[in-house]
Image (cartoon, rainbow, N blue to C red):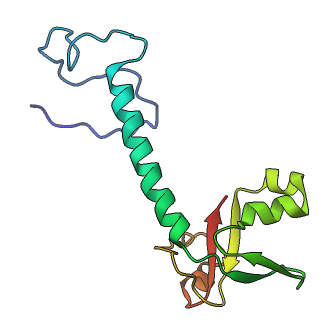
């Protein structure tokens, strides 16, 4: 093989410039044929149903305990853990607010059972330092 040329022109690649396959135009796995109800769809649906059932069992086992949500204006809302979500709270305030939101910024006074790994905001976030502190802010997608 030849040396790999680094792309330096900042232009989108639209055609291959590397060596061609000797397969003579054959597709991996044979020729592609569109079929209604392709065989893999049933296996994929069964796998999804199994995963959904397992996740549903885990979710139902989580404790649905009372929690207090403190809004930015200081108003406190009495809600239920694992029942009420940032999206349902936003919908209670305004449908248009909920439609404009994609992420909620949360700060826990205590961790709830069932919360797994939390991925904090990236370093470009102006509040990145607060995310790394114990009890700092966390972002939840809606």
Q: Residue at x 25, y 10 (%)?
A: 31
Q: Position of residue 9 (x, y in %)?
A: 42, 36
94 sits to left or right of 108: right
Q: Quadrant of the N terminus?
A: top left
Residue closest to the far left: 1
Q: Tell me: residue 38, above or below residue 97.
A: above
Q: Residue at x 33, y 9 (%)?
A: 33
The foreground one among 22 and 107 is 107
Q: Residue at x 51, y 70 (%)?
A: 61
Q: Residue at x 90, y 82 (%)?
A: 75
Q: Position of residue 8 (x, y in %)?
A: 38, 40
Q: Quadrant of the C terminus?
A: bottom right
The foreground one among 56 and 12 is 56
Q: Tell me: residue 58, above or below residue 52.
A: below
127 sits to left or right of 59: right
17 sits to left or right of 7: left
Q: Tell me: residue 78, above or below residue 42.
A: below
- Exactly how many numbered labels are in the figure? 0
Dividing the picture into quarters, in which one does residue 81 lie?
Answer: bottom right
The foreground one among 142 and 56 is 56
Q: Position of residue 135 (x, y in %)?
A: 60, 89
Q: Position of residue 121 (x, y in %)?
A: 57, 70
């Amino acid at each position: 093989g030849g040396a790999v040329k680094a792309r330096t022109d900042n232009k989108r690649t639209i055609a291959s410039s590397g060596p061609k396959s000797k397969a003579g135009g054959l597709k991996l796995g044979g020729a592609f044929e569109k079929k209604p109800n392709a065989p893999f769809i049933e296996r994929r649906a069964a796998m999804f149903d199994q995963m959904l059932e397992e996740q549903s069992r885990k979710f139902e086992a989580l404790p649905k305990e009372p929690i207090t949500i403190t809004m930015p204006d200081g108003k406190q809302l009495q809600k239920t853990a694992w029942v009420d979500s940032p999206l349902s709270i936003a919908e209670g305030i305004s449908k248009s607010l909920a439609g404009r939101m994609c992420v909620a910024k949360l700060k826990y006074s205590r961790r709830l059972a069932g919360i797994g790994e939390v991925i904090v905001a990236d370093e470009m976030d102006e509040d990145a330092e607060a995310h790394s502190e114990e009890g700092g802010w966390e972002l939840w997608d809606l």
